[in-house]
Image (cartoon, rainbow, N blue to C red):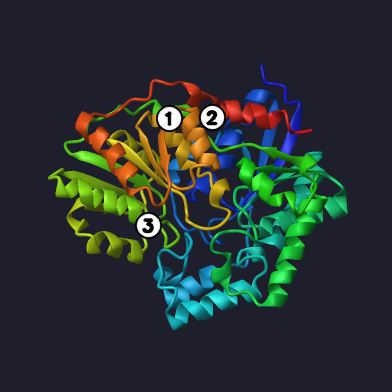
Amino acid sequence: MEKKIKKRVLIITYYWPPSGGAGVQRWLKFAKYLPEFDIEPIILTIDPNHASYLQIDKSLEKDISPDLKVFKTKSFEPLSLLSKILGKKNIAYGGFTNVNKKSILQIVLRFIRGNFFIPDARVGWNKYAYKKAKEIISEYKIDTVITTSPPHSTQLIGLKLKKKLNINWIADFRDPWTDIYYYKDLLHTRLVKRIDEKKEREVLEVADKIIVVGKSLKENFYSKINQEKFVVITNGYDEEDFEEHKRIRPEKFTITYTGTLSDQYNVAAFIEACKMLKSKGVDFIIRFIGNVAESKQNEFKNAGLLENVEIVNYVPHQESIKYLYNSSALLLVIPDFNGNKGILTGKLFEYLASGISVVGIGPTDGDASEIIDECEGGKMFDYTEIEKIYENLYNLIESFRVKQNDSKQYLKYSRKNITKFLVSNID
């Protein structure tokens, strides 16, 4: 007997498999579990043949139910065009970790990107997505639309749908908009910055409800809009992603970091702590899974730690979890800038679910630190606490075992539990 669906919801998201990265997983997982709560998600996304994806991870497609309706449209993508002309290696991503920001070419590209494509270079998808969204809303009698960003241009699709069709519109923010840590790198003129801020404010004012991934991001928006329409729904981990993996004790003490490490990630104290460990004759590996800025690689090299560093390029999601389990400790670094207390990366919840001790570098009064403490999953240290970081690492190395977190507090952050909370906020 076919399950009765109480409600259909249209989810408009630029990032969807085969795109990889943490941003894809949030609504992929919501779409996976929403039917268990009698809500049918319908996905509107970009045709991958027209998309400017930063990474590809086809392994994520396993979470797409054959019953899920997914509509794809074409787009005008200047980044794809530039990639063909200049080569993919010259197209910046991940906070500009993969390029030299000081080169003339990159300065010109950043200026063009920041001032000719507002709010971002993926705004060319909007007219195609808007047209298709109207058709889907009409055909499936949809009264609730969810837009998720970045790219923040996606929020403008929801804004237009709200104005034209008066649907119930929920705007989901995974990152800040004009307060993102690399915003100044886009070299906006004063006029363009005012235009961008006006668009951001209009989205915040018109949306019926605003979802954010952490409480500090919610507070960040307080000065811009009434707080009553905000709800915090964090990222999480999918229990099914962890079922096939088992903990493996690495041959050497191995500290693993997954994701991007850009110029804004202050690892100076961590490096100094590692130098102290090495001076004591301790043998260890610092493993990075993902893109590491050249400047950061040089910091480890200049500290005499090059032989201790292992860099693995982007890997499929399931393989990244395998690396977590083959670790002795997990490194979490929050970008170092004003207003960073709200940075709450999706990988944190997978770190916690692995049970491996987290060594965090960042604001000790931020959202990430609070959740690590709540789940008894490790410790967050300030950017200058060299001695404390050293002592923590030394204690972990002395035990030289895969330390399992016996606390079960992290279970509340399972994707299924978070989806249940999402459902309670869908009118």
Q: Tell whether label 1 touches label 2 (CB within 8 Å).
A: yes
Residue 291's disc number = 3
Check disc 2 and report the residue beneath it: 413
Q: Nearer the viewer, residue 142 or 101?
A: 101
Residue lying at 34% horizontally and 66% vertically, measured from the top left: 295
Q: How far apart are marks 2 and 1 (CA)?
A: 9 Å
Q: Nearer the viewer, residue 319 or 298?
A: 298
Q: Which percent across, then down, holds residue 234?
A: 59, 37
Residue 16 in sight: no
- Specify the amino acid type for callout 3: Asn
Q: What is the residue that sits farthest to the bottom in this orientation?
A: 104
Helix, strand or loop at mark 2: helix
Check disc 1 and report the residue beneath it: 353
| 398 in relation to 105, above or below | above
**Which label's residue is closer to the chain start, 3 or 1?**
3
Which quadrant would residue 301 be assigned to in this image? bottom left
